[in-house]
Amino acid sequence: EFAKSKTMKEQREYLPVFSVREELMTVIRDNKIVVIVGETGSGKTTQLTQYLLEDGYAKDGMIGCTQPRRVAAVSVAKRVSEELGCELGKQVGYSIRFEDCTSKEETKIKYMTDGVLLRESLLDAELNQYSAIVMDEAHERSLNTDVLFGILRKVAQKRRDIKIIITSATMNAERFSEFFGRVPTFTIPGRTFPVQQYFAKTIQDDYVDGAVKQALTIHLQNGPGDILIFMTGQEDIEATCFLIADRITKLENVPPILVLPIYSQLPSDIQAKIFEPSEHRKCIVATNIAETSLTLDGVKFVIDTGLCKLKVYNPKIGMDALQITPISQANANQRAGRAGRTGPGVCYRIYTDTVFRNELLENNIPEIQRTNLANVVLLLKSLNVDNLLEFDFMDPPPQDNILNSMYQLWILGALDNTGNLTEMGRKMVEFPLDPPLSKMLIMSEKFGCSQEMLTIVSMLSVPSIFFRPKGREQESDAAREKFYVPESDHLTYLHVYDQWKMHNYDQEWATKHFIHGKALKKVREVRSQLLDIMKTLKMDLNSSSGTDWDVVRKAICSGYFHNAAKIKGIGEYVNLRTGIPCVLHPASAIYGLGFTPDYVVYHELVMTSKEYMQCVTSVDPHWLAELGPMFFSVKQAYGNSMMKRD
Ligand code: ADP
Ligand code: MG
């Protein structure tokens, strides 16, 4: 309602941050570094950059604003370009991995992921393009934000003419101020309404079902007000949306409801729907993206499953895996708060208060302390940080994590025995990819299949190629199976892309085969960017011309030999590194085609009830030893008999 009836200017002036604009800008003028704290929705992300622009801070450089999430960077840039009444990509732009929507001459405000700024610091350690940098959503403590803290602290020491602003929801602000040398903290007065909170009386076995029931109850028993459900990830979100819509249609005389998913892999035009006004009640089903990154107005009811999906470094298996994990109490309070932005609200938790008090951590663990640091290590090494254990981390990662990541880089050949970057490592840094993927690309040159590997790596960088609409599962599965290359999911991806190319990159062809045309388009863009990097590195662009798939599988193996498994029973494998049983993901081309190879390598593990290997390729065990000699000999030295060659 508000958005429809008020002008942009009136909307901007209604935000809490506007009421303190003058004091705030005075503090910024008088200090190089400032920490700003404010409730979600107070206007930090959309207004600060504009205030800096209005006050002339973009005269000798850009105003950069980092976001931990891609979706937020894009959505906020769009919003701000609308507020300023200009075209996106001109005065206001964004830059996320593989997608730069800025203009060299015109862009004054640039939203970007923290990863992008981090990579820029490789090219220009003092970040001279920027006259001001807003590190937004610092409370999220994303891996890249944490590394940027250390880098920005150095930048601040070297540059007299820079403004650094760290913004945070109400958590952690003192830590930030402390870290940067007791810099001033400015608090934007809040405007929040009370939120009534309810817990489940008993533990629910099925949080999807629990959330669906709760949403229906709210819808049937309450007047206007949107519902926001916090779910784990894409699969659960889609199931939830389907179930709500399905059950509503089966009831009679129920007012319509607009069910909208939001997660980071969702195409951006569908994402934008959550901001569009609607005459019916909206029910938004989101990941923790809606906790602070995106501000949704009009939410009166929050349903909290108490869970989120996180990349967690699992020391038992020595690598990252996506895991459904309980949120922290701080997250739970943030989630509840989403119901009280525009009026009093209600939060229903699908878990008991005993669980809340006894099982949820008070605060979440910074990502730097729970994920693989291989990319960070590579990056810092190329910034000439020799001793990583002495880098300026706000919360240093456990030493074991650093050493483990260095070990991973060493077996991949990126670090030498003294811990310095090798030529391979230096090449790897050039690619905005995880080290195993860069390694595959670099090795493909030697194996004579770089064109093929470019496609495969690009396909892996864009998730959810296939779609599987509810009610048409069999049809879509059959369509997908037609592309299967029995020995490899990677080759299956290659096959899909080549077929699409043969059909002149036709979107309709893709849709007909239950493939996301938009995703393929994205793959094509990613591919051309990776191709450019290979050209810059003067790498050979060669092709096995579809006659020899073994070389492609070998190149795949060169990046993944530490993700190998050996067959144990029908469809069952055992991880060669950890000895832990694992199984093929049901969506794998290898699964159920009557061909179960003795040895496979996999792209990642997804842990639910079992450890599922996702994206798998069969390999010859001799390749494992040939391509990962360091890895195998070390394991043998430690007496891991499973690593012996057959
Ligand atoms: P904060 O960063 O303090 O959480 P934001 O600057 O993100 O606050 O949001 C301020 C307000 O801007 C929100 O309350 C919302 O009304 C509006 N807004 C932000 N993004 C969008 C968008 N994409 N579409 C419409 N309105 C938006
Ligand atoms: Mg914000």
Image (cartoon, rainbow, N blue to C red):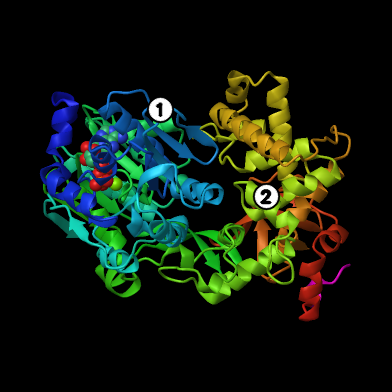
Left or right: residue 606 versus residue 395 is: right
Inter-mark Cα distance, 1 to 2: 34 Å
Bounds of the magenta segment: 641-646
The one nearer the camera, 348 or 499, is 499
The one nearer the camera, 471 or 400, is 400
Q: Could you say which quadrant of the image residue 602 lies in?
A: bottom right
Please give the residue where the numbered disc 1 appears in the rendered image.
106
Left or right: residue 127 versus residue 613 is: left
Residue flagged by tag 1: what amino acid is it? Glu
Residue flagged by tag 2: what amino acid is it? Leu
Q: Residue at x 58, y 28 (%)?
A: 521
Q: Residue at x 39, y 38 (%)?
A: 110
Q: Residue at x 75, y 61 (%)?
A: 413
Q: Could you say which quadrant of the image residue 176 lies in?
A: bottom left
Label number found at residue 303: none
Give residue 186's position: percent from left, percent from top: 19, 57
